[in-house]
Image: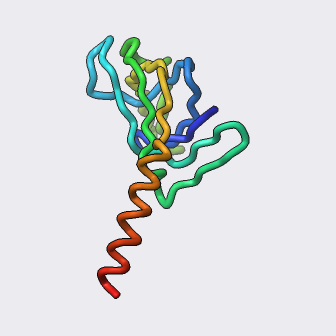
Amino acid sequence: MYAIIESCGKQYKVQEGEVVFFEKLDAEEGKKVTFDKVILVSEEGKVQVGNPYVKGVKVEGKVVSHGKAKKIIVFKMKPKKNYRRKQGHRQPYTKVEITSIKLASKKAETAESKETKTTEKVKA
């Protein structure tokens, strides 16, 4: 079973027990993190695609650590103008271990469908 979630402006494919590196999150080490923006869920060949998100599905994880990625070099140059600038950058990240993917219960789905049917009857 896997899910595709949206966090920090990016999409990540996650599975239970997997360790994922996200952009810097505001959470302390050891705390739980919940991702509500689930785009797609695949379970035993059954795929649920959201519009834009799948309702009732949550992905939970535990913050393992914070850190910085390897340094990248940003080099700017304009030829024939004696303009050269060298700058380094290290992107901060948060290391998260995915603990569970919680699906919407079927009872909740049937209750929602009953409520929509009754509201449709009332409107008619």
Task: Locate residue 23, reporting x and y percent.
Answer: 41, 30
Front-most of residues 106 and 52: 106
Residue at the spot 42% in from the left edge and 32% down from the top edge: 85
For the question of whether residue 69 can be seen, the reply is yes
Q: Is residue 15 left or right of residue 96?
A: right
- Look at the image and name its color scheme: rainbow
Residue at the spot 53% in from the left edge and 19% down from the top edge: 19
Q: Is residue 66 above or below residue 91?
A: above
Q: Is residue 117 above or below residue 102?
A: below
On-image quarter of the C terminus: bottom left
Task: Locate residue 83, reporting x and y percent.
Answer: 43, 39
Residue at the spot 49% in from the left edge and 39% down from the top edge: 103
In the image, farthest residue toward the right: 45
For the question of whether residue 77 can be seen, the reply is no
Front-most of residues 66 and 89: 66
Task: Locate residue 117, reporting x and y percent.
Answer: 41, 71
